[in-house]
Structures are given as C-alpha cells and as structure tokens.
C-alpha cells in the first residue's frame, strides 16, 4: 500500500443531517474511514448509529450533506459495501443452508437460477472457512445459534469483496464468549482481506483492543478520532450537551453523566428505547 | 399380465377420454406452477395474501358466470385487480392493511353470495355454485386448455427469472436492498404472480380450495428439504403427482359399485393432504432418529 492508497477514504460522510417525521435524527455528522481501518461506531440506543449505517448503505436518504464512497458520490446500487444488519429474524422453515446465504451474497442480486459450478462452490467454501463456519455449512440457517448465524452473515457480506464492512450491533444478542470470538474474527478478517470495518455497539469496551478509531454518537451528533482523542470529558460533554466524566477502571472505560461517578452511566447501558 | 394390472389401476377409457385429457394437461400445468409459486408464498409468509386472492376469486368467478363468460377470465380479472389494489394500498402500513383486507374480503364474499344466488336462480341449478367454489377439472373445456397452460408456463418462467432476488429479499429485505436488489419491484411482481397462481388454481380445484393447491405441496416440500432449489422442484413434483393421482382416483371411483364417483377436487386435495401428513411423519421420525444417534455418539461409542 503506497502513501496515496493510505490517504484514500473508503467512505466519507460530509455534514450528514437526517430529519424523520419532524425530528432531527442526525446533525452535521462528518467522518471518514481509510482502507483496512477498524472503526467502532459507539453510542447508546437511539443515538443514531443505525441511521448512520443506513445512510452509508443508501437505505436512508440524508436531508443534508453527502456520502462519498471511494471518493465518488454513492451510487444507488453499491456493491463495494458489505452489510450485516442488527436483527435478521430467520424462520426455521426458510429453506436456506448456511452456504446458500453466503451464495446469495455472491450473486443474489442477479436474475435466474444460480448455476452450480466448481469455482462458485470453492469460493463459498473458502469464505465459510474464513469465518470458521465449515462445520455447519450445510445446516439450515434457522437452526443455527446467534453466534453461528453472525459468522454466516459476515461471510455473506464479505464474499462480494467489499472494501468496507458495516455491522449493526453484531454483539448485541451474543454471550460474552461468542462476542469475543466475533470481535477476534473481524480483526483477523480486516487484516487478511484488507477490508475496513465499521461496527456499531453500545459498549465500546469489548472493542478497545481492536479499534483503530472511534466514532462516538450521542443525540444525533458524532465525534471521531482515536479513542484517546474522542473519549474525553470535554469532547463528550460537547456532544451530550451536559457535563460528562470519563472513568478508566481496570482497562475499561466508563462514560458517566455529570462529574460524579454516582450518576447515570452513558454509552454502556441502554437508557432509552431503541428507535425502530 | 401387464395389461391386467394396468386395467386395475386405470379404469377403461381413462386415457382416451377427452375431459380426462384436458384435466391431465391443464391440471398438471397449473400444479407445477402453483407448487413453485407456493414455496415462495410460504417462505415469504404471504399465505394470508394468497388466501385473500382465493376469496376475491369467488366473487370474480360467480360474476363471470352471470355475465356468461368463462370462469377463468373472472378469476384472472379479479385476482389481478386485487393484487394491484394491495400494492397501491401500500406494503408499509402492515397493521392497518390487515384490518382493511379483512373488511374488503368480507364485502367481496358478500357479493359472491349475491352473485351465486343469481347464478343459481338464473340457471335453476346449483352446478354453478359448486363449480366456482369447489371447481371441476373434468368440466374444463378443451378450448381454454391452451390459455391455462400458457399462463402457467409464463408464471413459472417469471418465478425462475426472479428466483435469486426473491429468495434474497425473503431472507432480509434490508440485506437484499443493500446489495442492490430492487426489493419493492420484486415483491410487486411476485404479488401478481401469486394472483395468477391462485386464479389458475381456482380453475382446477375451485376458488375455495385454490390455496390448498398453492400451499399444500409447498408446505410438504419444505418439510422434506432444506435446499431452496430442491424445495421448489419437490413442490412442483408433489403438486403434479397429487393432481394426476386425484384425477385418476376420481375417474376410477365412478366405476366402483354403489357410487356416482367422487368429486375430483376432493380427491386432489385429499391426496395432497395425505402427502403432507406422510412428510410430517417422516420428518418427526427422522428427527427422533438423529437424536438417538447423537445420544449414542455422546455416550462415546
């Protein structure tokens, strides 16, 4: 990777504002992601994380500002961004095996029946291998555990060889051990496949060892930079609009309202209803 | 010897009988198509929408009879109009739509009751009501067979073209949209295909029973296989065999002593239902077998 490559933005948001039914959901959100970077999109439920991801994907039109993908305005159909949504409710009756879901990531947007071929099968196998999903490649998607489904969905998103992988709260429904495995898997994939990762979470602590940068979202506003640059009381107080203290306890970061530790904890526990 | 066996299975005249020929061709084509459309109807959780078309078709068929045009055209016109209305009312407002659909269906069936009453008094026979509600494969006129086969083939082809985007958007509309699938368009086209499938099924087994042909083989196939492609072909096959066995059964039953013969729609639906029960039994036995084997493995043998 040359210096020019390192300074290229995979995605850049420039002054994104979103209004939905008379409410301002996002206000002047700007940040960019470089190739191969691992970025955490951190904020409590309802802060606007999902909306940011939807704007990047083109599922939500911004009211103001623009999204540049690889330096160009986002096309209606962009296949250089892989996406793993927050909740995919999979009916156990849905006749899809893990490998079928990965196959849909490869050519699911095309018309007609998929033509079985050796290269196609090999590519799907490789992807399943990369996320350690070979053991359940032929199981029905609906019968897999949350962590297993998550792996398959990551393989689905990656097989199109995107430059950017978006994951919406992938750790939300997982136990601590599976969550840890997924984070480790994503770190490995980001390095091996040289893909940038933008992952939303309400708790930044599981991501601290792998995050290159953080985009901290509160009340529809965002601040971005390294963890040390962003997760500071001055920066977050500005976002929240009230005093905030950042506490570091045994390698963990706690963000609390006010200047005393006995007040409400922000950014780690859900304290508002998730916007649907 | 072979002739004797064949004569026991097929009552004399089965293959040379013109109504039987029409029934086999038209019923077979519709069954293939309904099986394939049915798999996606079940997978997308749209069985209720499918059933609404069936209710609306009762009105269409009875109105067509009153006007003296073929029931097929009544079924088709109303189905397609209903699909358009459902699309225009919007897929977004789910809850409001359920109530609206319920009210509209009630009104449609009320109209059907009126039309069927007029049909009966005008022709002084209850034949019309039975044919529209419960169908009769043996009364399909040879002149409508090409239209039925043509529409079936067209619908089948359309589903095969939409196969991947349909499957993708059934998994997750957002994931499909993010990957560039025109989800809205795909679901609108599928709505029309479903309308077509129900109208054609209504011609074979009647408006009321049409969902049995749409959902039955699909539900059976989905019990048997976890592969999407296999489920589609299995549903088509189960539908085809179900309809043909039903026709044979109905034809043969007229030769049995003490009988006027059983209605063909009954035997078709009965065969499909037996298939479903058998598949259900098979899957539960298979699940039990798997559990036993796993237990044995766990014990370290």
Image (spheres, rainbow, N blue to C red):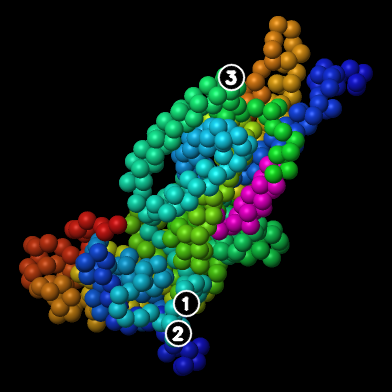
Specify the subunit that label 3 lies on. Answer: B
Taking depth in this image into account, of B128 and A190 the one nearest to the observer is B128
Pick out the residue farthest to the bottom. A3
Which residue is drawn at the image coordinates 26% and 57% (left, top)?
Answer: A274
Q: Is residue B70 magenta?
A: no
Q: Quadrant of residue A50?
A: bottom left
For label 1, the residue is A75
For label 2, the residue is A72
User: In the figure, A141 relative to A67: above or below?
Assistant: above
Q: Secondary structure at mark 1?
A: loop
* For the residues bearing labels 2 and 3, Cβ distance under 8 angstroms: no
Residue A192, visible in the rendered structure = no
Which residue is drawn at the image coordinates 44% and 70% (left, top)?
Answer: A165
Count neighbours of disc 1 (C-alpha within 10 A) and say few if under 14, some if 14 to 19, many if 20 or more: few
Q: Secondary structure at mark 2?
A: strand
* For the residues bearing labels 3 and 1, Cβ distance under 8 angstroms: no
For label 3, the residue is B125
* Start-end of magenta stretch: B148-166
């Amino acid at each position: 990777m040359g210096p020019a490559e390192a300074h290229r933005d995979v995605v850049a948001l420039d002054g994104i504002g979103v209004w939905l039914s008379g409410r301002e959901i996002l206000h002047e959100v700007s940040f960019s992601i470089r190739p191969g970077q691992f970025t955490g999109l951190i904020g409590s439920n309802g802060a606007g994380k999902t909306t940011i991801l939807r704007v990047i994907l083109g599922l939500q039109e911004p009211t103001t500002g623009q999204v540049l993908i690889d330096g160009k305005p986002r096309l209606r159909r962009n296949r250089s961004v892989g996406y793993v949504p927050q909740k995919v409710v999979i009916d156990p009756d849905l006749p899809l095996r893990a490998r079928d879901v990965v196959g849909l990531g490869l050519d699911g947007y095309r018309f007609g029946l998929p033509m079985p071929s050796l290269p196609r099968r090999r590519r799907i196998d490789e992807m399943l291998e990369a996320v350690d999903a070979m053991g359940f490649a032929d199981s029905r998607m609906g019968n897999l555990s949350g962590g297993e489904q998550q792996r398959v969905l990551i393989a689905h998103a990656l097989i199109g060889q995107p430059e950017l992988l978006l994951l919406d709260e992938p750790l939300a429904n997982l136990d601590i051990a599976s969550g840890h495995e997924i984070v480790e898997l994503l770190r490995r994939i980001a390095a091996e496949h040289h893909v940038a990762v933008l992952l939303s979470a309400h708790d930044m602590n599981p991501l601290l060892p792998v995050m290159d940068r953080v985009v901290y979202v509160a009340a529809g506003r965002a601040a971005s930079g390294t963890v040390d640059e962003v997760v500071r009381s001055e920066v977050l107080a500005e976002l929240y609009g009230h005093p905030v203290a950042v506490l570091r306890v045994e390698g963990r970061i706690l963000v609390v309202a006010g200047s005393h530790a006995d007040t409400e904890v922000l950014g780690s526990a859900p304290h508002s209803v998730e916007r649907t | 010897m072979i002739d004797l066996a064949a004569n026991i299975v097929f009552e004399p005249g089965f293959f040379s009988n013109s109504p039987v020929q029409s029934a086999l061709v038209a019923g077979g084509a519709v069954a293939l198509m309904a099986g394939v459309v049915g798999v996606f109807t079940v997978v997308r959780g749209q069985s209720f929408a499918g059933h609404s078309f069936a209710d609306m078709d009762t009105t269409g068929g009875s109105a067509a009879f009153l006007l003296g045009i073929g029931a097929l055209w009544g079924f088709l016109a109303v189905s397609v109009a209903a699909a358009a209305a459902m699309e225009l009312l919007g897929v977004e407002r789910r809850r409001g739509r359920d109530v609206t659909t319920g009210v509209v269906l009630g009104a449609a069936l009320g109209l059907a009751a009126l039309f069927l009453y007029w049909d009966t008094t005008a022709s002084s026979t209850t034949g019309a009501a039975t044919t529209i509600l419960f169908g009769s494969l043996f009364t399909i006129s040879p002149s409508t067979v090409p239209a039925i086969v043509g529409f079936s083939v067209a619908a089948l082809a359309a589903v095969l073209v939409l196969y991947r985007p349909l499957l993708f958007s059934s998994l997750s509309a957002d994931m499909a949209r993010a990957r560039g699938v025109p989800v809205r368009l795909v679901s609108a086209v599928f709505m029309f295909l479903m309308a077509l499938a129900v109208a054609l099924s209504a011609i074979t087994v009647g408006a009321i029973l049409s969902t049995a042909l749409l959902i039955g083989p699909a539900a059976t196939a989905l019990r048997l296989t976890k592969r999407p492609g296999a489920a589609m072909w299995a549903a088509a096959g189960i539908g085809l065999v179900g309809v043909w066995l039903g026709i044979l059964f109905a034809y043969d039953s007229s030769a049995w002593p003490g009988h006027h013969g059983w209605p063909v729609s009954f035997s078709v639906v009965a065969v499909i239902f037996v298939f479903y029960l058998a598949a259900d039994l098979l899957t539960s036995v298979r699940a039990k077998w798997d559990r036993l084997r796993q237990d044995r493995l766990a014990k370290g043998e």
